[in-house]
Image (tube, rainbow, N blue to C red):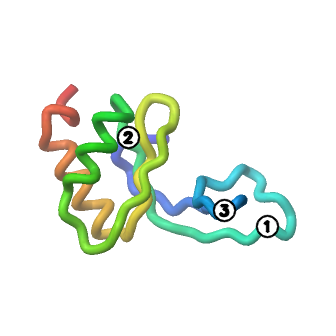
């Protein structure tokens, strides 16, 4: 994953909770696609900062190795990236 790059990812809802889909997706599994970006850094700090960014809808934040994966509408992901990159978290 490249930091701050917006990509389309697949998501599944096993047990009713949205999460990034495994690759390959199990046959017959329903999936959804959405825009995501990898934000490197401390997952707890990034989650708090993402929650503080004003966006049109909501964003899902998934802790991953080395940071978080943010899932939201394209323009909201752009806004989140801009806010994080201009903060002290984005300058580390």
Residue denoted by label 3: 12
Q: Name the residue under label 1.
A: 29
Q: Which of marks 3 and 2 is nearer the N terminus?
A: 2
Q: How far apart are marks 1 and 3 (CA)?
A: 8 Å
Quadrant housing residue 89: top left
Q: Please report whichever mark, 1 or 2, sits nearer to the chain's N-terminal start.
A: 2
**Mark 1 residue crowding within 10 angstroms, few (<14) / some (14–19) / many (20+):** few
Residue 35 falls left or right of residue 90: right
Kind of element beneath mark 2: loop
Q: Residue lying furthest right in this view? A: 27
Q: At 20% from the left edge and 43% from the top edge, which residue is drawn?
A: 85
Sooner in the amino-acid sequence: mark 1 or mark 3: 3
The answer to whether marks 1 and 3 mark residues whose Cβ atoms lie closer than 8 Å is yes
Q: Is the residue 24 above or below the residue 55 in the image?
A: above
Q: In this view, does 46 lie to the left or right of 67?
A: left
Q: Position of residue 77 (x, y in %)?
A: 32, 60
From the viewer's perspective, tell me whether residue 57 is left or right of residue 65.
Answer: left
Identified at 60% across, 53% down, the residue is 20
Quadrant of the image occupied by residue 58: bottom left
Q: Mark 1 falls on what kind of element?
A: loop
C-alpha gap between disc 3 and disc 2: 23 Å
Q: Could you tell me how far apart the alpha carbons at marks 1 and 2 are, in whole angstroms? A: 29 Å
Look at mark 2 in the image and give the residue it sits on. Answer: 3
Residue 48, image x and y in percent? Answer: 27, 43
């Amino acid at each position: 994953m490249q930091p701050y790059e917006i990509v389309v990812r697949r998501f599944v809802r096993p047990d009713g909770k949205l999460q990034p889909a495994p690759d390959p997706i199990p046959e017959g599994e329903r999936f959804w696609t959405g825009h995501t970006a990898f934000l490197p850094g401390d997952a707890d700090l990034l989650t708090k900062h993402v929650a503080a960014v004003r966006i049109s809808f909501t964003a899902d934040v998934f802790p991953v190795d080395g940071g978080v994966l943010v899932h939201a509408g394209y323009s909201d992901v752009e806004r989140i990236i801009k806010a994080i990159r201009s903060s002290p978290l984005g300058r580390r």
